[in-house]
Amino acid sequence: MRAVTTAQPLDVQPTPLALLLLGREADPKSERGVECPGDLPSPSDPDLVARARAAKEKLGEKVFVLGHHYQRDEVIQFADVTGDSFKLARDAAARPEAEYIVFCGVHFMAESADILTSDDQKVVLPDLAAGCSMADMATAEQVAECWDVLAEAGVAEATVPVAYMNSSADIKSFTGKHGGTICTSSNAKRALDWAFEQGEKVLFLPDQHLGRNTAVRDMGMSLEDCVVYNPHKPNGGVTPEQLRAAKMILWRGHCSVHGRFSLESVEDVRARIPGVNVLVHPECRHEVVAAADYVGSTEYIIKALEAAPAGSKWAIGTELNLVRRLANRFAAEDKEIVFLDKTVCFCSTMNRIDLPHLVWTLESLAQGKLVNRIEVDRETESFAKLALERMLALP
């Protein structure tokens, strides 16, 4: 018989990293994203472009390729349409003759396309590892627990969830089931206006910055009207009194690319380029948005640069692939376009969709082999679609 010994307590002090992982400490630079090189590796096979063209030509109208604005140029060249995530999902739904929808973007985008397309269409993601760090910051279990915390504080019935398009199908489904709607960075104010007509408070997830910037900058609320719910802390790290006093309950999530831009970035580019116009995405931090000259969605950024006068100078706070593409596009019009931050960084998950993965996908489909299908289950799809339809019905 084995002897049983009683372990003595160890005098171990948790490290700062351990505390951070437990959600008990904060890293002031946690939104800086990862350090990464300013250049992407070239495709390894010089014949990849020819192979992609041949496979796409063989598939003909059976395939419809969607390319998000943040994709690499080597991938974008094969896209039938380009745009933001919701525009692309709607474009896919408008092409019922296409049996295969190849979504060059990230996982939540492919899910949205599957929700909005017919049962006969098959949505394919060239690399299943192409996720979204922001979308992953809110899981169904965490949001259900948050709702329990709101119920215990007596505010759940007065709270309307508004989920950003950059969320998983599970979160969209939760939103639909609880009477809420979806929003994009273009219509966030309209979505919030609608939500406040339905209830007294909004649970905005998963991007705290879009929620805060819309509430304060566009709707005239104060920063004190907002409280941040941290899913890694007990009860979200907020008291029932704070929840009852708040109008906007913001999920502690962010975009790892847009979160890296800082007030110092804005001040530095103004010092380096006199007369520069600073144009940023509303996923940036509040202090960055407040210091910028213009703020808007990806589509807004493109249209603003299209309308800009020749000779104007612009510093853009969004993903680098798009900034570089726009800089090249408008160079002939003498528009100077630079990346807002001196340390360049691509979206690491978006860039998982590279030319080798796209070629493999197209060649597999051309051979009659379905790969990497993204399929949302029926129950999740029904409530997620309800939330999306509420957004489509917004005035």
Image (tube, rainbow, N blue to C red):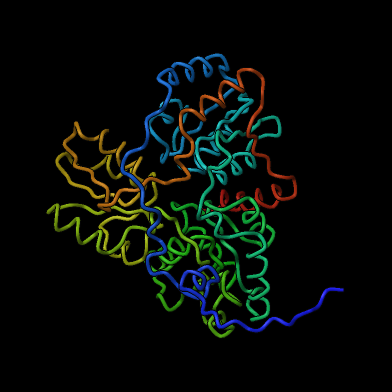
| Nearer to me, 261 or 161 | 261
Classify residue 101 as left or right of residue 6: left
Classify residue 145 as left or right of residue 3: left
Identity of the residue drawn at 54% across and 54% down:
135
Classify residue 3 as left or right of residue 85: right
| Nearer to me, 190 or 159 | 159
Q: Position of residue 96 (x, y in %)?
A: 62, 28
Give the position of the N terminus as an image quadrant: bottom right
Identity of the residue drawn at 45% across and 38% down:
68
| Nearer to me, 66 or 54 | 54
Where 179 falls versus 109 (above or below)?
Answer: below
Q: Position of residue 395 (x, y in %)?
A: 51, 53
| Nearer to me, 145 or 342 | 342
Identity of the residue drawn at 40% across and 20% down:
46
Identity of the residue drawn at 56% across and 64% down:
195
Q: Position of residue 371 (x, y in %)?
A: 64, 30
